[in-house]
Image (cartoon, rainbow, N blue to C red):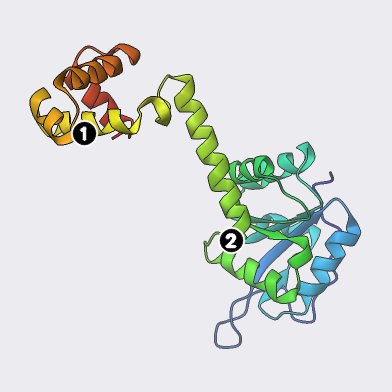
Amino acid sequence: MSATTSHVPTPAWPMHRTSRSERPERVTVAVYAADPVLRLGVVQQLRQRPEIDLLADTHVERAEVSLVVVDQVDDDVAALLHRLRHNTDTRTGLVVATLGSGSLQRVIECGVAAVLRRAEADQDQLLRLVLAIANGEGVLPGDLLGKLLTHVGSLQRSALDSRGMSLSTLTTREADMLRMVSEGLDTAEIARKTAYSERTVKNVLHEIITRLQLRNRAHAVGYALRNGLI
């Protein structure tokens, strides 16, 4: 994917900044796209808005907001996003046709501040996206946010599992008994509160300590608290 923009015709207003008394400050925007047709569609939408100052190729590094318009996120797109991330003067938004949960995680890691589906990229949505990015806000469609949270949760669970700390390492009964131990209850008190025999309580706690390779009940309680199991 080419990391350069095609020429942007000079807007009707001057490219330099004027005072706030003359007009509101405009947001400087650079648009990147592999397909010139995709880029042209976004440029034409934004060019009509007085809040936006579209930059030509020679000034894109000064953009407050960089919009990357693509069909999908591939290695070339990721490379461009990484490059833009190193420019501390700009914040990046992505206008994309399709984006799976894995690709979403990838673009977030590349520093993308906001995502908009191309099918929803009309003039109002594009303007809202640009202004939100310029104001330091993150923008993500609701369903994509859900996918991201699910994906991140899956990664976290995988990391826990690989270290033997899966959230499923304790059953409800085991977690309840460990919680009572953490509250200072002894075996007899736990047996009365749970309606189990003292022998069952001892066996359950011994199973936890053995399975997780811990030293004693105090170690089991500390382990469970540190890892959010109780």
Q: Residue at x 72, y 73 (%)?
A: 15
Note whether 208 is above or below 176 in the view shown.
above
Q: Quadrant of residue 24?
A: bottom right
The residue closer to the viewer here, 148 or 71, is 148
Q: Nearer the viewer, residue 72 or 158?
A: 158
Vertical relation: 135 (above or below) 34? below
Instruction: Quadrant for the N terminus, please.
Output: top right
Q: Is residue 131 left or right of residue 54?
A: left
Q: Secondary structure at mark 2?
A: loop
**Residue 56 percent across, percent down from the top left:** 79, 63
Q: Position of residue 96 (x, y in %)?
A: 75, 55
Query: Can see residue 88?
Result: no
Question: Residue at position x 52%, y 28% from top?
Answer: 158
Q: Earlier in the sequence, mark 2 or mark 1?
A: 2
Percent position (x, y) of residue 39? 84, 61
Q: What is the three-letter code of the residue carrying label 1?
A: Arg
Left or right, residue 190 beside residue 27: left
Residue at the spot 55% in from the left edge and 83% down from the top edge: 20
Looking at the figure, which quarter contains the C terminus?
Answer: top left
The secondary element bearing badge 1 is classed as helix
**Occupied quadrant, residue 91:** bottom right
Q: Which residue is tagged 2?
A: 139
Q: Is residue 21 depicted above or below 77 in this figure?
A: below
Residue at image mark 1: 179
Q: Nearer the viewer, mark 2 or mark 1?
A: 1
Res. 211 visible in picture: yes
Q: Say which residue appears at 70% left-offset and 81% top-offset.
A: 50
Residue 40 at x, y percent in the picture:
86, 65
Say which mark, if any, is on residue 125.
none
